[in-house]
Amino acid sequence: MTSTPGSEAGGEIGGCLAHQEGKNMLNHGGIDYTTYLKLDQVLNAQCLQSEIHGDPAHDEHLFIITHQAYELWFKQILWEVDSIRDVFNNVTLDEGKTMLILSRLNRINQILKLLVDQVMILETMTPLDFADFRNYLAPASGFQSLQFRLLENKLGLKQEHRVRYNQKHYHEVFKTHPQYVQMLEDSETEESLMVLVQRWLERTPGLEEDGFNFWGKFKASVMDMLGDELQEADSEEDPMIKEDKMAQYKKQRDAFESIFDEDKHNILVARGDRKFTHKAMQGAMMISLYRDEPRFHQPFQVLTQLMDIDSFLTKWRYNHVTMVQRMLGSKVGTGGSSGYHYLRSTVSDRYKIFLDLFNLSTFLIPRDRIPPLTQSMHRKLSVFDRNDDSGISLDDLRDLSN
């Protein structure tokens, strides 16, 4: 049997095409790609101010595209945060909602990771390239990003923890847009993710004083540990080593007193050094210590994802600060702020929403000091739902707390 040149290839291609036959739905009123994504609007939304002023600067296009991409991702993050708040705020929750929360928290973190890396694209622009069009931007400023301010509020940043922008309330930059101010005010009065997470932690099973009484058992174990440390320090014969051990003991004792004494804890909250309520702190500590128990697997992952949000936002702020210093040095920002110095002040613990989760490690105790679970408590934290072995759900925490 003979074959003509290319007939094999032609047969393969023909076979492929045969399997790809179908109807063009656009001929039946379907929506096309450009229309669905409104690309005619999106791709024509780059208006270069340098061009308008007759002095076109090539890198202004990159500057606009990058910031528009930021805003689109901010919109998606807000979409996810609102959905997570709705789940936490729902009185009746279906089994398995914790997995949904974890999935969406992870999505937020993947987006934030992308935004952190996106700063590097802007850094391909040199300070001189930026100077070519910077003067045309004033008084526009990144501080005027409504969506980022909404995100901070919805996550749980309190107004008293904000660094004042040009010594004014942050609403001031939006005063020409009354609808934006209203949106900001609404986001301040709504229950933030932080508030909802605290309420969830306060219902952690095992905190009940007439039940397992985790906090009482934990405190007793810590007191025993501190007693052993004091005895060890007292018995040390070398004066220098003894002084060092005694100092370490006092530091440990004072740290634990600050969480065991609710009044001291509340003072730290008022100062902004802590964020959680005393009961929520107890719940977070219990989940952290007993995270190997099946029903605490996913709650511990939730706490980890919440810390990741703070971590990525801190990294993003830091990368932004570094880039601004590289581009502007100590020049005043286009919005009139102190520029680099203002931005640098936002890279601090006062902007961390879930600060207490980071500091839990201060109060961790050795595994052999962790209070053993009672048989009843072990059973509650070990038994999976017969229809879902994915771990604890928010319903479970409510049921076990009642």
Image: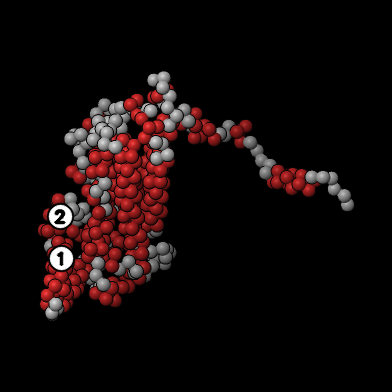
Quarter location, residue 137 = top left
**Quadrant position of residue 342:** top left
Q: Where does residue 80 sit, x and y in percent of width and height?
A: 37, 46
Q: Residue at x 31, y 29 (%)?
A: 140
Residue 55 placement (x, y as % from top left): 41, 22
Q: Amino acid at mark 2?
A: Leu
Q: Is residue 276 visible?
A: yes
Residue 206, horizontal then vertical, whole percent: 25, 67
Is the residue 140 above or below the residue 10 in the image? above
Numbered label attached to residue 268: 2
Q: Is residue 193 left or right of residue 94?
A: left
Which residue, as the protein is rendered here, is positioned at the far top?
54
Tell me if 30 is positioned left or right of 85 in this view: right
Residue 189 lies left or right of residue 77; in this view the side is: left
User: Residue 226 or 100: which is nearer the viewer?
Assistant: 226
To which residue does mark 1 refer?
251
Residue found at x 27% / y 39%: 340
Task: Check whether the beta carbons of the residues at disc 1 and disc 2 lie within 8 A of each other.
Answer: no
Find numbered disc 1 in the image and state the secondary structure of the residue it sits on.
helix
Label 2 Cα crowd, 10 Å radius (few <14 / some 14-19 / many 20+): some
Give the answer, above or below, for where 132 lies relative to 210.
above
**Front position in the image: 256 or 398:** 256
* Crowding near the residue tagged with mark 1, few <14, some 14–19, many ≥20 C-alpha atoms within 10 Å: few
Viewer-side residue, 234 vs 18: 234
| Residue located at (19% from left, 54% from top) | 274
